[in-house]
Image (spheres, grey):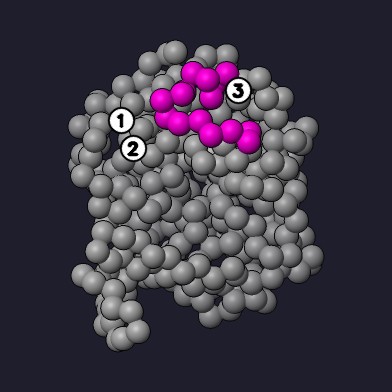
Amino acid sequence: MILTVTMNPAIDTAYQLDKLVIDDVNRVSPKKTAGGKGLNVSRVLTQLGDDVVATGLLGGHMGAFMGELMDADGIKHDFTPISGETRICLNILHEGNQTELLESGPEVSADELAAFTAKFEELVKQADCVTISGSLPKGVPAEYYVELLALATDAGVPLLLDTSGAALNAALESSYEPTLVKPNLTEINALLGTSYTPDQVADLAAALQADERFQGIPWVVVSMGSAGSFGFHDGKVYRAVVPPIPAVNATGSGDSTIAGFAHAIAAGADPVTVLKTGNTCGKLNAMDPQTGHLVIEKWDEVYNAIEVTEL
């Protein structure tokens, strides 16, 4: 079983418009999805045929609606209830642009957080792999993911961490090591105080390998959008180059990539297969208008076109 954690989920509501008219009425037919990065991971893993359980925090009427949406997607879930209302996030697709309006979400009490920690401790013992994705809600300290990482480590379960900012830095500076971290190029430059571009992969890889915060982490993958990604694993640096594709909706592609990594790592795949699987999932999501969903019939075409080389 793969356990996915989403601490700050949302009802993702997409509005598709030919043109966004400012200061006037825009009539839309919304598409509502059980959102949050970890739920995108869950949907892709479910599509890949994995046994998945989604967990995290849900509250209020929107939380109940989230449960209904997960049921409709065939996602098994076991969330901890909270008193605050689960947030709503709007994604307005217009004229080739994406304008997002993201609520910050509810504040979580110490008792609610303790209840979730206890639930996670039980669920992780049943898992073969764990993914933790996205931001932390208000009231939860930046170091909280370290607590979950410690529980997964004690249970001997690999954990893939996809977060940024203070939460990522806290995990990197802790004595516990996630199995994989996947910052994007912007996030890694912010962590290092650098401005590397996709043309400077070798220099960036050297900088990461020299940074003590990344020592001992089995997989460090840096995603670079259409330029593909690179990662280092067991002292080796790999570059993944992806084919150009007709992107329809790139939202959720990073989450889909994490799903692919989790799918491959849980299956004990070799490094090249791990990178090809993750990048394939990211690209197939971008080809699909539905967030956290793959154009699965294109799997062989995209997978076989991805080139992974050792630098």
Between the C-alphas of marks 2 and 3, the distance is 22 Å
Query: Which mark lies nearer to you, 2 or 1?
Result: 2
- On whether residue 14 falls in the magenta region, the answer is no
Q: Secondary structure at mark 2?
A: helix
SS for dot 1: loop
Q: Is residue 189 left or right of residue 270?
A: right
Residue at 38 percent across and 46 percent down: it is 253
Instruction: Indicate the quadrant where residue 290 lies.
Output: bottom left
Cα distance in 3D space between marks 2 and 1 = 7 Å
| Residue at 46 percent of width and 24 percent of height | 200
Q: Residue furthest front?
A: 195
Q: What separation in Å lies between label 1 and label 3 (alpha carbons)?
A: 23 Å
Vertical position of residue 86 compared to residue 191: above or below: below
Give x and y (percent) for residue 124. Answer: 64, 45
Callout 3: helix, strand or loop?
Answer: helix
Q: Residues within 10 Å of mark 3 (few under 14, many from 20)?
A: few
**What residue would you read off at disc 2?**
226
| Residue 270 visible in rendering | no
User: Which segment is the magenta one?
Assistant: 192-207
N-terminal label among 2 and 3: 3
Mark 2, Cα crowd under 10 Å, few <14 / some 14-19 / many 20+, is some
Label 1 sits on residue: 242
**Front-most of residues 93 and 66:** 93
Q: Is residue 57 visible?
A: yes
Predominant SS of the magenta segment: helix
Q: Which residue is labeled 3 in the image? A: 207
Say if 66 sits above or below 265 in the image.
below
Give the image location of residue 161, x and y in percent.
Answer: 59, 41
Residue 209 is situated, as x and y percent measured from the top left of the image, at 62, 20
Q: Is residue 220 above or below residue 53?
A: above
